[in-house]
Amino acid sequence: MNIFASPSRAPGQAGQTYNENWSETTMNHDAFDAHEAPRSLSVGEHLFLAGERNGVWQLSRGLVRLESVGPSGTSFVRLAMPGDLLGAECALHQPYAFNAVAVTDCEVTRVDTGNDMQRMLIVMTAFLQEQSRAADAMRMRQGSVAARLDHLLQVLNAGMDESEPISVRQRKLPQLRDLAFMIDSTPESACRYLSQHLGLQRQR
């Protein structure tokens, strides 16, 4: 079974996938002026923590998970994809609202926020991006494990290079524990679905 096959669903139809509205909500990677050289992140590395202030970033490669930390533990907020802005609240002189953690190896660039027009563009762009990402985050947390995981895999595929072989893209999937965390499941349930239905064995 091809886990990256696009469903036969017309754009705009109820339940449309992340990939179908991708071009409308993701800015070109060069849309914002870079403030400094790109920074690389390894899997599990934090870009920033809630409460810190360290500028606005744009993700150019990889996947970043935003999460909130409360008395009951850590909760998944949304997944950031290439082109997404991270920490846009800093453009409004506010601290970061969430933790940002690399789900895969990533590359990010700090965005120039030196003038009012640039800051306004950052806030507007981030708002539009977050609307789409929030809708996908809801679909990743509702329904059966199979439905949640299927949608997450579609989202992940939207951020990958389609020219690469499917086998290469499968190897770039996040680790099993990260997949399970994002869909509010156990690693065992996610592993069972991947193994039985997709023929994949993922690292825990």
Image (tube, grey):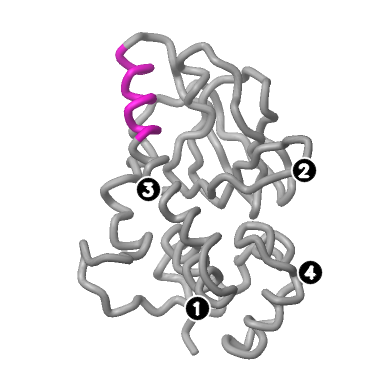
Q: CA distance from mark 1 to mark 4?
A: 21 Å
The magenta segment is: 117-127
Numbered mark located on residue 132 in the image: 3
Badge number at residue 6 = none
Q: Report the Cα–Cα distance between label 1 and label 3.
A: 25 Å
All told, the count of numbered labels is 4
Residue 116 picture location, percent across and down: 34, 9
Gap between marks 4 and 2 measured at Cα: 20 Å
Confirm or deny contact between disc 3 and disc 2 (CB under 8 A): no
| Position of 56 relative to 201 (above/below) | above
For marks 2 and 1, give the CA distance: 35 Å
Q: Which residue is mark 4?
A: 204
Number of the front mark, 2 or 1: 2
Kind of residue at badge 2: Gly
Q: Are marks 1 and 4 in contact (CB under 8 Å)?
A: no
Quarter holding the C terminus? bottom right
Of the image marks 4 and 3, the number of the one nearer the N terminus: 3
Instruction: For mark 4, give the secondary structure.
Output: loop
Q: Residue at x 63, y 38 (%)?
A: 100
Depth check, front residue: 137 or 61: 137
